[in-house]
Amino acid sequence: MDDIFSQVREGNAFHVRVWLDNTENDLNQGDDHRFSLLHWASREGRTNIVDMLILRGARINATNLGDDTPLHLAAAHGHRDAVLMLIHNKANINAINEHGNTPLHYACFWGYEQIAEDLVNNGALVNIANKFNDVPLDKCKPYLARMLKDRAIALGQDLSKIPFKDRSWLGYKTRSRDAMLSRHTGIDIRQLQLVGHIASTHSGETWRGTWQDNDIVAKILNVREVTKRITRDFMEEFPRLRIFNHPNVLPVLACCNQPPNLVLISQFMPFGSLYNTLHGESGIVVDQNQALRFAMDITRGMEFLHSMEPMVPNFLLTSKHVMIDEDLAKINIDDPKYQSGEATLNGIDEDLTARINMADYTFSFHEKGKVFSPAWMAPEALQRRPADINTRAADMWSFAILLWELETREVPFAELSSMEVGMKVALEGLRISVPPGISSHMSRLIKICMNEEPGKRPRFDMVIPILEKMKHQ
Amino acid sequence: MATSPNTSTSSGTLTPKKKDESFLEKIGTLARKKKIKEVNELQEEGKNAIESPTSPTLPDIGPEGYQLGEAEERSMIEPHSRENAKLKDLIQVLLDWINDELADHRIIVKDIEEDLFDGQILQKLIEKLANVKVEAPEVTQSEIGQKQKLRVVLDYINRMLQLPPVWNQQKWSVDSVHTKNLVAILHLVVALARHFRAPIRLPENVCVTLLVVQKVDGVLQTRRITEEITSTNDDIGARFERDAFDTLFDHAPDKLNVVKKTLVTFVNKQLMKVNLEVTDLDSQFHDGVYLVMLIGLLEGYFVPLYHFHLTPDTFEQKVHNVTFAFELMQDAGLQKPKARPEDVVNLDLKSTLRVLYNIFTKYKATTSSTSSAVQ
């Protein structure tokens, strides 16, 4: 386990890839000093691993205990490729560490001219002061200072000194995860400090609480009688939900198997589900870009789940089973919009990310014979058992309903009860209607995804380029 | 070897008319040696009486009736009571059940009296029902062998049914079964059917009239008594107490229609949503489909169609549906229904009403104001 950090340091790409393929491994975990894998890869200039980690959803702006971001380390050690890669993936260019230093401070101090230039070209401020009231230009050799100053003026930077502001209180938000989190399987229910009751639904009760200083949600499954067989099945099925290696999948962290209580523990998501965000009173504005971003996140998450062999069965894709997370990695605390409150100032438009919640998996013994969200299910899934249908194609139908939901902001078949929806969709050909207001590309995509012929529906990997294209239009 | 059905009207608990030697042997054990000669004569007389169609026989009492000791009693089924439609029905239902159970063994029972007396089929039946192996002697033609086997099997059954010895002596015994006493055999099979909760619906209140002969002061006296083979079905295992429905059925049949009407209204209010309508409570719930729909509507979920049979054809499919509906009801926090799924499938009105009423009491308040919980 701990070895992965040295593997990354030594640049053993093959080992790292194998490690990342194991769903139980959390690529955002940190070592004792909360250096994440990306920190180490950046520090050692393992460009291929940096690339791999970014692709898999590593947090770009994760910080270690000294509040360094990977960009700090890449800049300080002169790895230009890594610096550029991080910058292109929206690394926070003016992030400050505990000393108040930005990456540019380090590039200047160590005399990496090209990197310093790249940083300034990409918006690094030359006059940001650290704790000791030194700006980057104070740190470098005179000729480099002159050059950078000229460049900054050319780019229109205001050269008055920006005083040091202690923002260390913000740091904890982006720090790498406690590596211990992904090592726990079964835990004692008494270790959970459950403080607030969130909801009681048909599937169980959810509580908010803390566990080892992490904000968590505990879902206590609603089972009539927890028999020996059921606890056995629970233990057998639960480990498959610990999927830590994809950013768009929200893993189950741990469980308690203490009859009569079966509890699933996952990270607390302050925004709740996508259903909540779209239809509830969350106060979150989901604009077109954000909706597209969600669609993309879900597609990526599903594509990953579908690539697993064997697949996690019995996961029904609905907006209730998708959680909304702040994309902390991409929030730029120095972004003016976080200071001025104006949302449209900078190019960053999508700050929320969608994650498929594995805690909403339906256990084989749970809610047997009951479907509470038939509106999202394909007609064939309502009629035939999962073994007899193409479940990937059925998921694609569910995704079409989700797209419709993201576009219309309506609940599918809101006026009907579940039994009515199920019977009518399965037997009477009831379908959602795509209103004329939505874009022709999107309405075409919805239609393709919910083709009556399951075999003719696309796969998730085919949807990714389509959505990407829409985003750039 | 045995009496023909036509003449067996008097077989009651009589000593079997077997080979003479064995008969004599038995009489010997009965310590009535003095009477051997007399008996032999009587036996002969009785045989003749039966075998010659022209000779008049005493209508009610078999020839052995004469052998009664002082104050001894014999009983037999009154001939016309055998023709009772309910009794025939009961016998047929039991035969069908036994044949169903033993189909794998390629055993077909045609006559409940002629085929069960030697314990062979009873052994197979009990082994199948309880999934046990009964160590009993192999099939044998000798009476002693048959009785030994029968004793082992009956002992096993009695232990399994946990019957007090007295009671079972009254209802059936090795002798009574071996002599093909219909009443004893019926009691035995009915007890088995009840104990193992056979998926059959026994006709209720089946009675036979027994003719009891007693010798008082050397004179045969006869009286008729009614023997109840089955009572009402809900005494099954005496597992549950009487409830309002028993009272309703027994004392206020007129009110029954009011209850039915209320239930139909309640049920239709839900089922209308999926374009279904109930007109006849007695028969439309027996296959379980509407029950499943009803629970789903009330609890706010859809039941994938592969979990039950939307158009059940066979008894098993219907039982599956009703059993599944019962599971869903328990998941919804309702009491485990007292009725068995088979009762509902067998169109037992009381069971059906109990189930529906149970649902009604839980949901009547919630459904009158708001429609079912959605989302």
Image (cartoon, coloured by chain):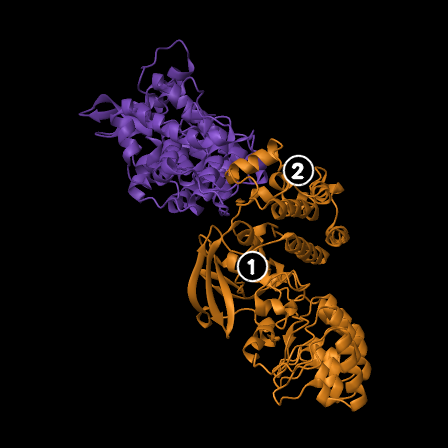
Chain colours: A orange, B purple
| Tag 1 residue | A359
Q: Position of residue A173 (x, y in %)?
A: 57, 73
In the rendered view, tell whether residue B141 sits above or below residue A295: above
- The image position of residue A273, as x and y in percent, is 55, 56
Mark 2 burial class by Cα count in 10 Å: few <14, some 14-19, many 20+:
few
Chain of the residue under the numbered disc 1 shown in the image: A
Q: Which residue is mark 2?
A: A436
In the visual, does B131 lie left or right of A8? left
Q: Amino acid at mark 2?
A: Pro
Indicate which label's residue lies in the foreground, 2 or 1.
2
Quadrant hosting residue A334: bottom right
Q: Give the distance between the C-alpha atoms of the residues marked 2 and 1, in whole angstroms.
A: 36 Å
Q: Secondary structure at mark 2?
A: loop
At 62% from the left edge and 48% from the top edge, which residue is drawn?
A406
Q: Which is nearer the eye, A33 or A310?
A: A33
Q: Secondary structure at mark 1?
A: helix
Nearer to me, A98 or A244: A98
